[in-house]
Amino acid sequence: MLFNTYEPWKFAFSQEVNNLDEVKDIVNNNNNRDNNKDNNNKDNDKDNNNYNNKDNNNKDNTTNFNENNNKSWGIVGVPFDSTSSYGTGSRYGSIAIREASFGFEKYNYNFKKELNSIFFDFGDLNVVYGNCKQTLKNLEETVNELNQLNINPIILGGEHSISLGVLKGLSNKYNLNNVVIIHFDAHMDMVDTYQGESFSHATVLRRIHELNPKEIIQIGIRSASLQEVDFLNSKENKENITVFSSKETNNNLENIKKYISSINNPIYLSIDLDVFDPAYMGDVGNPMPNGLSPSILEELMEIITQKELIGFDVVELSTKTLGNPSAVLASKLVYDFLTLI
Ligand SMILES: [Mn+2]
């Protein structure tokens, strides 16, 4: 090996690029390659490389919701933890996740597949500590830039409040009314205000609900306030918020697999790492006993990644220790996702 490839400030296996022009070239080639594959049976015209050409899209494919269907992914870290109410320190999550990625093989044994997807690591966002609103705004602008590059975001937290900035950015490109949010978490995060704050890790799903997604599916829930339970049980919300408790997930995984398999809409995936049992994932902002095991997430990830995905976030890892087991598990979620998409 001629070069030392351990570069812990970016996720292992990410593309080597020096500037945005190189990014654009790789993205265009990647989209063309996949489009040519899709069109092989009906159009062998090799000169036609315009991936935006509407005539080239397969109109029979009803799950192909977007004609600029992105095939490339971009990692952005958001080292923000200012609204954390119990355990702080998720500002170090993104770097710990990246460092842990250097422990994985390119061949993902569990899925019998190599990690060959095209993705970039754009580093960490400039966050404004103590100012959640401004940080969300900065993040929305960054996601807008990714939209323009036809790159879907993979966001490494930071605390959970940041998911709102990602979805606001994505709402500038996609119609969120069609998008299903799959939300793994021990907590509902559905209160209207928390400690007087509207923008917080504890209110984030309530703010996302206000963006009117098609449905929010919460998996692994085992903690909520009475206010949240009442909100979810109200007539209008019963239709577009579906909750699978941690107990239901552990006892009847097949039921959830079936439910997710039937989704035909684009999906945004948000994983609050406290969905795992603290035995597997102790270093999170709000650990909660009796959670999910890594093998359950592995099984569900395999189904979710077969769907049309527009974005993904992994939030709430809180550790300063490199190689910490929680960081490795968090990193493995990203690694599995990148292998499977
Ligand atoms: Mn949580």
Image (tube, rainbow, N blue to C red):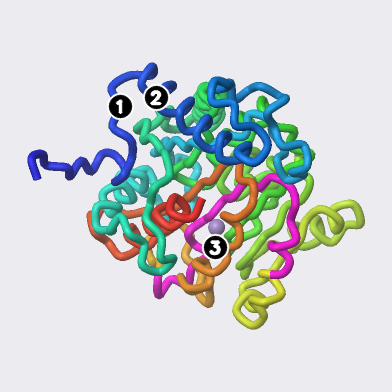
> In the image, is the residue at mark 3 within 8 Å of ligand 1 by its beta carbon?
no
The residue furthest left is 2
Q: Identify residue for label 1.
A: 17
Q: Secondary structure at mark 1?
A: loop
Q: Identify residue for label 3.
A: 302
Q: Secondary structure at mark 2?
A: helix
View quadrant of ligand 1: bottom right
Between the C-alphas of marks 3 and 2, the distance is 28 Å
- Tell which of 88 and 99 is nearer to you: 99
Mark 1 and mark 2 in contact (Cβ < 8 Å)? yes
Between the C-alphas of marks 1 and 3, the distance is 29 Å
Does residue 285 lie above or below 200 as drawn?
A: below
Does residue 127 lie above or below 195 as drawn?
A: above
The residue furthest bottom is 251
Is residue 138 at least partly visible in the picture? no
Between the C-alphas of marks 2 and 1, the distance is 7 Å
Say what amino acid the circle numbered 3 marks. Answer: Glu
Q: At which x and y percent is residue 2?
A: 8, 40
Instruction: Please tell me whether residue 261 belongs to the stretch shown in magenta.
Output: yes
Instruction: Please tell me whether residue 224 belongs to the stretch shown in magenta.
Output: no
Residue drawn 42% across and 35% down? Answer: 76
Q: At which x and y percent is residue 51?
A: 59, 25
Along the polypeptide, which appears first: circle 2 or circle 1?
A: 1
Q: Identify residue for label 2.
A: 23
Residue drawn 20% across and 40% down? Answer: 7
Mark 2 and mark 3 in contact (Cβ < 8 Å)? no
Residue count near mark 2 (Cα–Cα under 10 Å), binned few <14, some 14–19, many ≥20: some
Span colored in magenta: 258-280
Say what amino acid the circle numbered 1 marks. Answer: Val
Q: Secondary structure at mark 3?
A: helix
Say what amino acid the circle numbered 2 marks. Answer: Val
